[in-house]
Image (cartoon, rainbow, N blue to C red):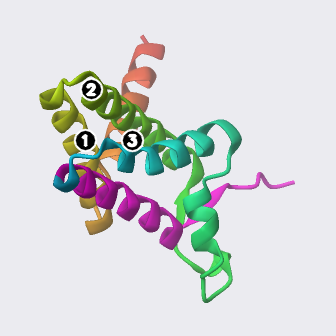
Amino acid sequence: MADKILSIPRPLVRTNQSIIVLSVVLTWMSGQEWFLFIPFIAGLMGIIFGYNPIMEIRKQFLRKDPKSYIPEDWEQQQFNQKLAVSCLGIGILSFILGWNTVGYIFTALVAVAAFVAILGFCIGCFIHFQWKQYKYRRSVR
């Protein structure tokens, strides 16, 4: 019996990335860090419960069968989501504590990573690949 490969249709991933970028820009423009809670809570729910409300809402508007879109690897996206939620969480906490420079740094990291991913290069995928290579090299010594 073949193993089932978990994947996420690309439009859902791109929507999630777009919401991250949009929330960071809105936070910077308005000075209201609560915009960051939207992708933070959605991402946290995706990690913990396997249910990302942003992707679930977007899924309702897909024009084709979800399997007909370019698939994104579920495990890789979980890793990316953990990075994004971590940066967003540090950014939120930093803004709340008045550490604005740290808040801007971490929200910029996640916004740039999401924007570059929309353009086609996944920084999180590169980090994940390097981490797996490192673990493999350590295991064969």
- The residue identified by callout 2 is 94
Q: Secondary structure at mark 1?
A: helix
Q: Nearer the viewer, mark 1 or mark 3?
A: 1
Range of magenta residues: 1-28
- The residue identified by callout 3 is 84
Q: Would residue 102 appear left or right of 64 to someone viewing this image?
A: left
- The residue identified by callout 1 is 107
Q: Residue at x 41, y 14 (%)?
A: 138
Q: Secondary structure at mark 2?
A: helix
Q: Residue at x 54, y 49 (%)?
A: 42
Kind of residue sitting beneath label 3: Ala
Q: Nearer the viewer, residue 98 or 48?
A: 98
| Residue 7, quarter of the rendered image | bottom right
Kind of residue sitting beneath label 2: Ser
Kind of residue sitting beneath label 1: Thr
Mark 2, Cα crowd under 10 Å, few <14 / some 14-19 / many 20+, is many
Q: Residue at x 60, y 53 (%)?
A: 52
